[in-house]
């Protein structure tokens, strides 16, 4: 396996730093213009019904995350109890969304599944299946939104609607190619960096798309509810998908600041800044911080139970 050239690694680091600098500049620019007292008032102004719906959607989203690992259970052909798999998935996503995929999606899965008796090869398959599930659903939804011109980037962005349409078509083509490959070659073993994988069957691939597309849709619905329907739902979904890519590029834990910068740039003229920031802060508290607290407690209980059994 070839290692990246030092020059390319240096260019990658420089590009990441420039991206972070741009995000910081955007946040500083908007932070100076925001009346934080109004943001606090907007948060306190949320009704019980709105917060309850948002919380229910958060629980639904994490339930779908558990579905990723339950589908991976079928793909990897292991026989851990479904309840244990769901607990492991919740813990992993609680940490992954806050600390990054390398820690949560991979690190915690290896720890928890290995302590549950699974071998490394099986865990590799679970991780690969779950990660690919998430991004396949992303490609499907983003492709549909971009090609249908549902997302219109700001005029000062380098990519415009025609560019997004081309990108969306490429995303949909990728999804179609994956489905065709699963239909025709699902019994074949692929060799990637010394590891062996096989494509899932077509029904399982369709389940991947349904789970992940549903989950991204629910995530956007949370923001939509907290924005109190001031922006059309497809627009909120498109902005969330753009923010997810920016977060992945930035490699910042929980995408702190990055997601907010994208929403402010895209919706800053459609929604008053205090209401927009209030929605994003409550979203972060509900979708990131509260599950992290729950995942930490569940992980401690998981480890304590393991020590008692030992």
Image (spheres, rainbow, N blue to C red):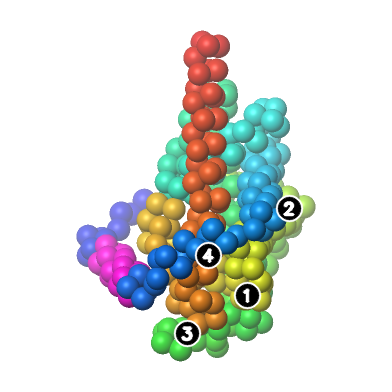
Q: Which residues are magenta?
A: 11-29
Residue receiving disc 4? 42
- Provide the secondary structure element on which disc 1 rests: loop
Return the residue at label 3: 154
> In the orientation shown, which residue stands out farthest toward the right?
203
Q: Earlier in the sequence, mark 1 or mark 4?
A: 4
Residue at the disc numbered 1: 230
Q: Does residue 105 show up? A: no
Using the image, tell me which numbered label, if any, was put on residue 99.
Answer: none
Residue closest to the eye, 92 or 170 = 92
- Structural distance between the alpha carbons of marks 2 and 4: 39 Å
Residue at 62% from the left image edge and 76% from the top image edge: 231
Q: Earlier in the sequence, mark 3 or mark 4?
A: 4
Q: Nearer the viewer, mark 3 or mark 2?
A: 3
70, 302: nearer the viewer:
302
Residue 207 marker: 2
Looking at the picture, how far across and down is residue 213, in whole percent? Answer: 67, 60
Residue 152 position, x and y percent, is 55, 83
Q: Secondary structure at mark 2?
A: helix
Query: In the figure, is residue 284 to the left or right of 143?
Result: left
Q: Nearer the viewer, mark 1 or mark 4?
A: 4
Decide: few, some or many residues near mark 4? Use Cα within 10 Å; few <14, some 14-19, many ≥20: some
């Amino acid at each position: 396996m070839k290692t990246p050239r030092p020059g390319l690694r240096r260019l990658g680091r420089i590009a990441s730093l420039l991206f972070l600098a741009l995000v910081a500049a955007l946040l500083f620019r908007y932070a100076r213009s925001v009346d934080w007292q109004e943001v606090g008032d907007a948060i306190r102004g949320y009704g019980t019904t709105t917060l309850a719906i948002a919380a229910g959607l958060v629980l639904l989203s994490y339930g779908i995350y558990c579905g990723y690992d339950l589908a991976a259970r079928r793909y990897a052909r292991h026989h851990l109890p479904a309840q244990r798999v769901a607990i492991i998935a919740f813990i992993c996503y609680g940490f992954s969304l806050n600390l990054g995929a390398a820690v949560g999606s991979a690190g915690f899965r290896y720890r928890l599944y290995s302590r549950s008796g699974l071998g490394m090869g099986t865990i590799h398959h679970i991780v690969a299946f779950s990660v690919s599930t998430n991004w396949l659903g992303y490609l499907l939804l983003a492709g549909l939104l971009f090609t249908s011109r549902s997302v219109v980037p700001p005029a000062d962005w380098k990519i415009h609607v025609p560019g997004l349409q081309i990108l969306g078509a490429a995303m949909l083509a990728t999804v179609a190619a994956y489905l065709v490959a699963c239909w025709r070659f699902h019994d074949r073993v692929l060799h990637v960096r010394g590891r062996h994988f096989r494509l899932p069957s077509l029904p399982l691939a369709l389940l991947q798309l349904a789970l992940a597309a549903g989950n991204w849709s629910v995530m956007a619905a949370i923001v939509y509810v907290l924005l109190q329907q001031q922006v059309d739902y497809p627009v909120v979904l498109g902005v969330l998908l753009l923010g997810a890519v920016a977060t992945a590029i930035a490699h910042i834990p929980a995408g702190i600041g990055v997601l907010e910068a994208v929403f402010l740039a895209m919706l800053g003229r459609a929604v008053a800044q205090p209401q927009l920031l209030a929605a994003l802060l409550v979203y972060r508290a509900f979708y990131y911080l509260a599950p992290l607290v729950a995942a930490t407690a569940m992980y401690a209980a998981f480890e304590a139970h393991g020590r008692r059994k030992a």
